[in-house]
Image (spheres, rainbow, N blue to C red):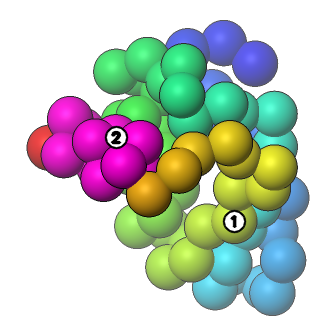
């Protein structure tokens, strides 16, 4: 996967998708834009096996505005 593409696995038709092989701790700006686009297209996204604590998650979301 490069910075501009994501591996998406549809979960329930067009309402949810799993994003594969993406570590949210190391996300680039272009990847974040692709995640945002995927969210708008799917309404719900699943990111499995992330290692983000509460403080990291809050910091990540604040930094991506």
Does residue 15 show up magenta in the picture? no
Residue 30 pos. (x, y %): 40, 21
Q: Nearer the viewer, residue 29 or 62?
A: 62
Quarter of the image with the N terminus is top right
Magenta region, main secondary structure: helix
Q: Is residue 3 visible?
A: yes
Element on which disc 2 rests: helix
Q: Nearer the viewer, residue 10 or 64?
A: 64
Q: Classify 44 as above or below 10.
A: below
Name the residue beneath numbered marker 1.
46
Q: Which residues are magenta?
A: 55-64
Q: Mark 2 or mark 1: which is in front?
A: 2
- Describe the element under mark 1 as helix, strand or loop: strand
Q: Position of residue 47 (x, y in %)?
A: 70, 56
Instruction: Name the residue at 69% across, 65% down.
Output: 46
Instruction: Classify the position of the C terminus by image quarter.
Output: top left
* Label disc, if present, on residue 15 of the rendered structure: none
Quick check: 19 left or right of 60?
right
Residue at 34% x, 40% y: name it: 60
Check disc 1: other Cα within 10 Å, few if <14, some if 14-19, many if 20+. some
Q: Nearer the viewer, residue 50 or 35?
A: 50
Residue 22 x/y as whole percent: 70, 33
Give above or below for 63 relative to 2.
below
Q: Residue at point 64% right, 85% down?
A: 15
Quadrant assignment, res 56: top left
The residue sitting at 61% across, 67% down in the picture is 45
Among numbered discs 2 and 1, the one appearing first in the sequence: 1
Q: Is residue 61 magenta?
A: yes
Give me the disc on residue 60.
2
Which residue sits furthest top? 2
Q: CA distance from mark 2 to mark 1?
A: 16 Å
Position in image of residue 49 (x %, y %)? 81, 49
């Amino acid at each position: 996967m490069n910075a501009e593409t994501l591996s998406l696995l549809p979960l329930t038709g067009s309402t949810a998708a799993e994003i594969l092989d993406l570590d949210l701790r190391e996300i680039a700006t272009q990847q974040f834009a692709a995640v945002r686009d995927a969210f708008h297209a799917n309404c719900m996204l699943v990111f499995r096996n992330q290692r983000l604590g509460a403080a990291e998650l809050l910091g990540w979301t604040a930094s991506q505005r």
